[in-house]
Image: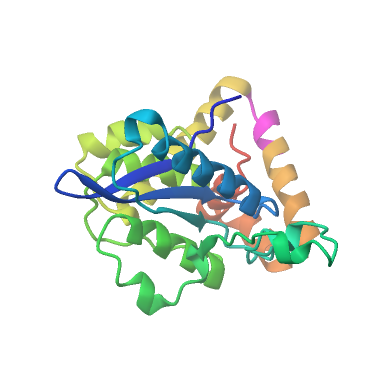
Amino acid sequence: MHSQYRDVAKYWKNSQINIALFGLENQTVPDKLMPMRVIGYDGAEYKKQVLEENRYKKKYPVITLVLYMGYEKNWKYSNSLLDLLEVDENLKPYVSDYKINIFEIAFLDREKINLFKSDFRMLADYLYQMRTTDSYEGDESDIKHVDEILMLMSAMSGFKNVENIIKVAHERKVSNMKGFFELAEEKGLEKGIELGRTEGREEGADMVSELNTILAREGNLEKIIKANTDKVYRNELLNKYRLLR
């Protein structure tokens, strides 16, 4: 009736035989209805296996992993389909449950995060640090997929002008998270200077005022004082709260 698209789908093969299909769903906010969404994705893949051209091929399992990228709060919703349904007790014996696999990346133990060997460890480390310290100290390990990890970090951290950051990263041969965040900070400061030159001080003052309002709502007096006396820290917060325009 309509198309359904997974965030990422990977076949696990042995020779030319499909052993399993892994679907990866990336979530930045918890979704109560995730079990219903996942059963739709998985059902579509199983339906494909019964089509005439696949009827006599070996059947393989479909496995969905939900990667929750939020760090400010846990995934509080159930992973069970039955918990979403209002089911009469007389019908319960006939209703099949469907459970989903949720991985809260920011809430993994440090030891588990350190086991990752791919660039994904950089993202997991960022989310862990933001959850535990509300700040981030960039890793100096080399990243293999610079463009991809920067685009992902743009979605996670609020990087502005990420295409320009990627371009400069390649020009300067920057290939680690520490360097990327330094570039983001540098470009953010340049943007602020440019705004001051081309549009006067009014917009900059509006951004600072908006930032102070957010910090006041959080009740963090120390942050307000530091943001108004430390330009680099203020720019970090403007980036964090996505106020740089």
Q: Quadrant of residue 138?
A: bottom left
Name the colouring of the figure: rainbow
Q: Is residue 202 magenta?
A: yes
**144 or 178, nearer to the observer:** 144
At x 42% / y 38%, what residue is drawn?
50
Is residue 159 visible in the rendered image? The answer is no
Is residue 214 magenta-colored? no
Quadrant where the N terminus sits is top right
Where is residue 116 drawn, in percent x and y? 30, 66
Residue ranking furthest to the top: 198
Quadrant showing the C terminus: top right
Magenta-colored span: 200-205
Q: Foreground residue, 58 or 117?
A: 58
Residue 37 visible to the viewer: yes
The quadrant in which residue 166 appears is: top left
Q: How far across and how far down the image is residue 236, in percent?
A: 53, 51
Q: Which of 230/90 is in front?
A: 90
Q: Position of residue 28 (x, y in %)?
A: 57, 50
- Decide: is 159 above or below 136: above
Q: Is residue 233 left or right of residue 83?
A: left
Question: Left or right: where does residue 118 sit relative to residue 64?
Answer: left
Q: Count the numbered circles shown.
A: 0
Secondary structure mostly seen in magenta is helix
Q: Is residue 132 above or below residue 41?
A: below
Q: Position of residue 172 (x, y in %)?
A: 21, 39
* Residue at 52% across, 56% down: 69
- Relative to the observer, which residue lies in front, 53 or 158? 53
Q: Residue at x 49, y 36 (%)?
A: 160
